[in-house]
């Protein structure tokens, strides 16, 4: 949200400066160029906010338990760590829900890889809109615990 406010303030300042500097017959041309530049700057600011800032990073947080069943690295521009957690017990795999998550922290990712196939507890926070650079899902895993008796 702060990116939006900053971009809007910059656009207003640019418009005021353009009107003060160009008080001759070229004003209609300059206004047209300034409006185009303002729209382009606004679009760029929105894209930057979505890529790097996300939207409401503290939307929710929680804990999920289960078995990590899938881990992968995805992405062409930004490589992200993605995984799936099988919620519940390991016996009845076809009836249980899977939960997709992203993990931007390399140290936490290595811990999850080491706990593959064991019962784990994942602490996460949910983004309203996840920044592209952090992952594909809206769930960002912050820490992992391997649970006792979690052997396959």
Image (cartoon, grey):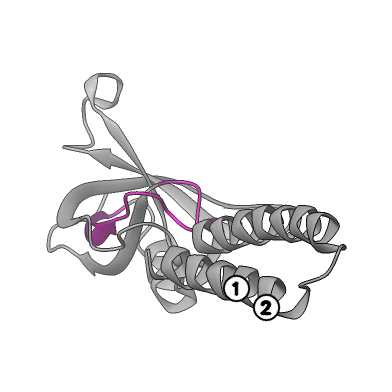
Residue drawn at the location 51% of the way across and 62% of the way down: 49
Label 1 secondary element: helix
Q: Residue 149, position in %: x, y? A: 13, 58
Magenta segment: 118-137
Which residue position holds label 2? 20
Is residue 50 covered in magenta? Answer: no
Disc 2 element? helix
Q: Quadrant of residue 31?
A: bottom right
Q: Residue at x 80, y 57 (%)?
A: 33
Callout 2 touching callout 1 (CB < 8 Å): yes
Q: Is residue 124 left or right of residue 82?
A: left
User: What is the crowding at mark 2: few (fewer than 14 residues within 10 Å), some, or many (at least 20)?
Assistant: few
Q: Is residue 125 left or right of residue 137?
A: left
Q: Residue at x 15, y 56 (%)?
A: 62
The chief SS type of the magenta part is loop
Q: CA distance from mark 2 to mark 1?
A: 6 Å
Q: Quadrant of residue 91?
A: top left
């Amino acid at each position: 949200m702060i990116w939006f406010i900053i971009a809007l303030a910059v656009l207003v300042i640019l418009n005021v400066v353009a009107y003060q500097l160009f008080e001759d017959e070229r004003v209609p041309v300059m206004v047209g160029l300034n409006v185009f530049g303002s729209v382009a700057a606004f679009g760029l600011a929105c894209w930057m906010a979505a890529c790097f800032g996300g939207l409401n990073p503290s939307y929710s947080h929680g804990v999920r338990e289960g078995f990590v069943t899938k881990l992968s690295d995805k992405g062409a521009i930004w490589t992200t760590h993605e995984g799936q957690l099988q919620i519940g017990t390991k016996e009845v795999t076809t009836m249980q829900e899977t939960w997709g998550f992203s993990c931007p922290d390399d140290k936490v990712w290595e811990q999850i890889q080491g706990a593959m196939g064991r019962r784990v507890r994942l602490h996460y926070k949910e983004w309203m809109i996840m920044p592209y650079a952090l992952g594909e899902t809206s769930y960002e895993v912050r820490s992992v615990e391997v649970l006792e008796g979690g052997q396959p």
